[in-house]
Amino acid sequence: MQPAFYFSVQLHVLCLYATCCSFTKHYADIVFLVDSSVNMGSSTFEQIKNFIYQIVDQLDIGTDKYRVGLAQYSREGLVEFLLNTYKSKEDVLNHLQGRVTFLGGPLQTGRALEFLHQVFFKEEAGSRISQGTPQFAVVITSAKSKDDVAEAAEELKEIGVKVISVGVQNFDREEMEVIATSPLVYQISGGQSISQLHQDITNVLEAPVQQQYVSALDAKVPAVCSSASVADIVFLVDESSRIGIRNFQLTRTFLLKIVNALDIGPNNIRVGLVSYSDEPRLEFTLDTFEDKSDILDYLKILPYRGGRTYTGAAIDFLRKKVFTQEAGSRKNQGVQQLAVVITDGQSFDDFVEPASKLRHHGVAVYAVGTKNTSESSQLVKIASYPPRKHVTNLESFLQLSNIEWKIKKQLCSEIVSQTFVVPVRSRTLKEGCVDTEEADIYFLIDGSGSIYPNDFQDMKVFMNEMISMFQVSANGVRFGVVQYESIPQTEFTISQYNSVKQLKEAVRVIQQLGGGTNTGDALRYMKSLFVKAARDSVPKLLIVITDGESQDQVTKAAEELRQEGIIIYAIGVKNAVKKELKDIAGTEDRMFFVNDFDSLKLIKHDIVQDICSPEACKNMKADIILLVDSSESIHPVDFQKMKDFMQLIVNRSDIGSDKVQIGLLQFSSEPQEEFQLNQYGSKADLRKAISGIRPIKSGTMTGKALTFASSYFDEPKGGRSRVKQYLIVITDGEAQDIVREPAETIREKGITIYAIGVLHANNSQLVEIAGSQDRVFFEDNFDSLTFLEKEILFEICNLEDSCKRIEVADIIFVVHGSRSITDLQFQGIQKIMEAVVNDSVVGKDNVQFGAVVYSTNPQDHFSLNTYSAKSQVREAISNLRPVPGLTFTARALNFARERFGMAYGGRTSSLSVTRILVLFTDQPTSPSDRPNLPAAAKSLKQDGINVFAVGVDKANRTELEEIVGERERLFFVQSYNELESLHENLTHTVCDEAKPACGNQQADLIFLIDGSLRISAHNFSAMKTFMKEIVDSFIIAQDKVQVGVVQYSKDPQKEIYLNEFHSETTLKERIDSIVQLKTSTFTGKGLRFVKSFFETPRGGRKKQGVLQSLVVITDGQSNDVVDEAAIALRNDGIHIFAIGIGIPNSFELLRIAGDARRVYVLENFEVLKTIERKIVTEICELEDRPSQGK
């Protein structure tokens, strides 16, 4: 709070009070639509005329006051008089008395509502809709219509008309509720006189401005807004003369509704406001008000000044004066920055560059405006990408009341999503791209003179961010860049740089050429580059980025490249031509368009996902059940869109009994089976079955449906126990029953749930269904479902795995094949060896393989340094053959141990590369060699070689246990036929053993762990196991990685200093001995206490430039404030990772970490093991080291 500014604001408010109150008189345009069908009858019709007469008689009629129109209808509508026909009350009343005659005929209310929309609510008919004058339709009906009313009524309400329905005679209450704007439904029954109603209707029509404020503050708040508790939001409001006082009044009411939905507070959501016309005016900054009530009071009397529209200057003002630390912005604390621009009319200055600069500044921009703005695409050029989530076009400001729910939900969803969803999905994407091991990717970038230098820089950032997503190596994914203008120029070829670091530096130094735009020539130029770089069976991809129309033809050149098997992605920016982009890409699926270069980073996810999907989804096996809401709130058109979405899921899945199975259930008040998982084995049959389903159209009992769905994953109904299983729930409304327990029951069976919610779905319930926010997908409407299917299927393809790839290791296979082994049986061993290779990143700096085949004597078939490409290793394995002779396993183990030496390509112990030996045998060791076995096993252990054994048939289990030392490293099957069942277990166990690749050989890492009473002994033990697993991932030494531990509860307690233990064994023993404190949770106190542990006397090495990391693990909200202590740690150069367990959407984690990318939200302590590698990778990839000597 800034006291001086607050005082001036209060003074300003008092001075404006009289100005505001002079506008409280509130006129309207009112159209009466009267049923004149046979159902009404002439006598009742006369009563209705009298009823309307009484209402009009109480209104102040005039051109600038109330305007009234009248229509009657039966089969079709008939105009009695338009809104601009009469200018005096007397003329209106005279017409009502003398000229309105009863029609008779059938009742078609839907058609009449459509007639009302098309004829009356237009400027030429006297409607003042564009000026913001309230629009009312009073619909009087006597029976259920012969035609459908829903669509016509919805369209009328969508343009901002408030519909009052009045029922007489045999009215249909349900239909009246569909027609009316809730709760404006009135009826005459039980001998009531219709004249008794006229005062109720008049009260609605004459509601004063103050009543709007009251109803605004009573407006319903989306559930997601209760979770969205930390953000900085600034509203920029156009107050130019084109707006007009009535529209500005509607804007005030709209702002009241939005702000009232937000969790306002100095440590929660902060709100600022700027109004503008000729110049921007700061109404209040982000830190002016601490209480919501003060902001609401200010908004009620927000002044309207008029003037011309200078949107560009106002947007610049936001960036320079409002989104600053001095004005209360918390951007440097990792708090999201959002701007909502509300405007009408063309700007007198350039707004495109100021909007781009604001977005570059890290502000997500939402734009709301009328058709005057959308005609020039102004809103799209102001707002963030994608427009469907950030742009709202209105025909008039009266529609603001229709979109307030959508805007509230968009803002709150953005706040929640950017913290708890986007970072998780980015990690998932990068993990999924590990499967894309080989690809040749060229960027073809437009360097013409029309591109500004900062836009060219955006292109370079985009390329570098894409490069970072892949496993770059000489034999893996390779990148090259060609820049073009009138002529193309190779910046670097695909074989020039073999590491992410080298590529990023090469991109960084690219200089823009300038010149024309000959995209066709550039495409032709690419052909020879791809030919030179060609590798067999390796995907070839070209990513074209251009900002304008080509000066030459592109179609033929692009077609020739595609004929060579090159997949082209076409990205258009600003003035690029969409048809040309489609011609380049060959399909809309690989065509992207953004309005500005700063949006490139936002389409990166979609492009990378498309590139990585084929490999991530190869050989996918899954059971997928779709559980879809077909309650009465879902319109038939929307139900069809849901069916279209399901068809997309089917089309993109590899359907079959040993591949992907899909089942379908729908629900309303009751659930209903459509088909089980194993019912249809082909895409055609599934599509036909989906096409045929019909909605139930009743209530929304989602909990009951979840309980019903659970058994459909079991074997009797087609479920496969060894296959990953998924439930996709789609709903558009709030469940009328409990969802948490039935959803938990499903998840406890190992089934992953994705929850898709449309507009009115309740986010809290969706999180209860899915178990975490990152498995919740929210869209504004059913049209947007088509954007989700790729994302969901990619997540299904990319299994959650504690270890996805062996990154760095020296692995030697030691294979025995007895004299009796057949070629087919030996192939079983080769396949399991290949499975280990396939799950590894092969390369001289990553995983190296060697192979020894033995009988009486061992033979070295290939050494660790023989091959550096996965394909070469696989081929070498396929060429292995069994050797006749005896089973001298001890001799073979000693021989293999020597093969880990540097002479054979083994890496020195100083690099701490994990050494793994995998033994395959189907016989016990020969008696003469058996005495040597204990010594051989001991030598392997002393050399730090981890031994795994696969025993088949007659192999001796006791002997193998002696060799491996730990039972979980032994795999045993009774026959060669069973070997295939071991693939997954063996590769996972080997993967878990290998340390991840870590670029940072030095780090100071401290764990700050919650030891409060809420955490069970079992869960506290899980936390200790997690810490020990992290320790195992690093080289623990005084000059390598040091680890410390602090436990906190009500008070913090020292457990381990950084310089206390320098061996893995003693460090893990000390972690095991930690005793839980078991009191309350004071995380802030713990954060303050831990700061000194990074100091030099306690082992901290920040003065030597060593990376400093703190991992905070907690299971609940703190009883004290965390912000100040966390900021002090981060200002000291300490990177904080915040792990929250069982506390969905806790923004306290963001306050601790200061960066959403370092926030982890887990459902329970069991899931900790799935993020071990992620945390280690994050620590390894940290780049901003503390300055030495500080």
Image (spheres, rainbow, N blue to C red):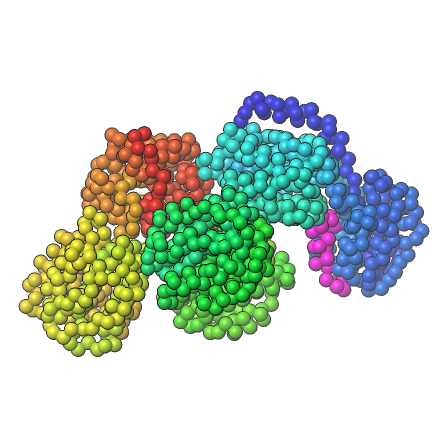
Front residue (pair 107, 495)? 495
Residue 158, image x, y percentages:
69, 51
Asked whether, in this view, residue 839 is left or right of residue 280, the answer is: left
What residue lies at 30% left-to-right and 65% top-to-bottom?
871
What residue lies at 59% left-to-right and 30% top-to-bottom?
284
- Relative to 1114, residue 970 above or below: below
Front residue (pair 295, 1154)? 1154
- Relative to 316, residue 429 above or below: below
Residue 1002, image x, y percentages:
27, 41
Residue 520, image x, y percentages:
53, 60
Residue 612 in sight: no
Asked whether, in this view, residue 612 is left or right of residue 919, the answer is: right
Residue 31, image x, y percentages:
81, 49
- Relative to 1055, residue 849 above or below: below
Q: Quadrant of residue 203?
A: top right
Please give the count of numbered marks on the rendered protein.
0
User: Is 162 included in the stretch rendered in magenta?
Assistant: yes
Q: Quadrant of the C terminus?
A: top left
Front residue (pair 172, 1169)? 1169
What residue lies at 18% left-to-right and 73% top-to-bottom?
882
Q: Which residues are magenta?
A: 144-163
What residue lies at 40% left-to-right and 71% top-to-bottom?
658
User: Is 91 included in the stretch rendered in magenta?
Assistant: no
Asked whether, in this view, residue 755 is left or right of residue 1112, the answer is: right
Residue 876 in sight: yes
